[in-house]
Image: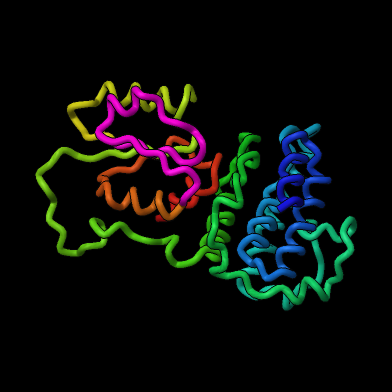
Amino acid sequence: DAYANYGGHLAKIGDQDAAADSLIRGFWISLRKNRIDAAIALLLRRAFLVPTVYSSLVETDDARIQFRQRIRDITVLAHNGGNNWMEDKGDLFRLDNYEVSIQEIQGIPPLKGKLQNLSEIQSPHFYVHYNGLYDLPIQKEVSEMFALLCPPSLFEVSPHLARKDRITKQRMKRIGFVSSLIGGNEPHGLLVLDVIRSLKGLFQFYVVSIGSKTLTTEFHTVSDGAYEVGYDSRAARTLLMSLELDCLVFAEAMNEAIVYSLGFQ
């Protein structure tokens, strides 16, 4: 946990190399203590590290190539573990900076379905799409990697949608908004408030805040239901299923890992 916190601090102040070293050290410590879930989260946080600002287009291209290679490396680890590992092309394990042998990497077990606590990832690959480049292939590879690492519950279907013989109720359509940046005076939240005010009476609106942001009183006033679930991914899934929504709107999906994962369901 100390290496995880220190790595997060280093990343925030822009020291990406030191952050990567700290996170990969935390990965090995967690793995050796058989804390597989925490180890995977730290490995993902290391893989997601990219510069927040690039000095040139060449540096941008190099960073994106390495990022994509790290995602592919973790995908291989999900399927096969480190069994066939030969080289660290994407610098995932920081072999030049951290004393670990190829043999130790080859001892990593298959990681498929072992990622349980998504909140430990903290943020998904937020800065990758900051370059304004064509990211669909990269985003698809990341989502496919997550689909492998996470358990089947990630693909849970809400009961009101799963019923084959469901009867469409004659009621006002129910629309939900979910975000980790919907509370306080965040622009996402102010936009959602304006949408609800403008369309209230045509639809029923429900607002779900993920993470630490507290919903303002106005959300409770203008919506038909306003909820805060913190960093509890199970509570978020259960709540969204219970609301029996006709439409779920993501105000953003790249700032918090739980919000990102809800997009798979």
Residue 228 left/right relative to 118: left
Q: Who is closer to the viewer here, 130 or 220? A: 220
Query: Toward which corner of the image does residue 214 lie, by quadrant?
Result: top left
The count of marks equals 0
Identify the residue at horizontal 66%, vertical 57% (top origin): 71
Q: Who is closer to the viewer here, 247 or 231? A: 231
Query: Toward which corner of the image does residue 189 lie, by quadrant?
Result: top left
From the top left corner, tell me how far across and down residue 4 is, in percent. 72, 50
| 178, above or below 159, in the image | above
Which segment did they paint magenta? 206-232
Q: Point out the residue furthest to the left here.
A: 170
Identify the residue at horizontal 32%, vertical 39% (top origin): 176
From the top left corner, tell me how far across and down residue 149 is, in percent. 56, 64
Identify the residue at horizontal 28%, vertical 22% (top origin): 197
Color scheme of the displayed model:
rainbow
Q: Is residue 217 magenta?
A: yes
| 185, above or below 207, in the image | above
| 240, above or below 76, in the image | above
Identify the residue at horizontal 52%, vertical 63% (top origin): 150
Q: Is residue 119 magenta?
A: no
Residue 161 left/right relative to 94: left
From the top left corner, tell me how far across and down residue 30 is, in percent. 71, 63
Residue 15 left/right relative to 201: right
Image quadrant where one finds the C terminus: bottom left
From the top left corner, tell me how far across and down residue 31 is, in percent. 71, 67
Q: Who is closer to the viewer here, 187 or 69? A: 187
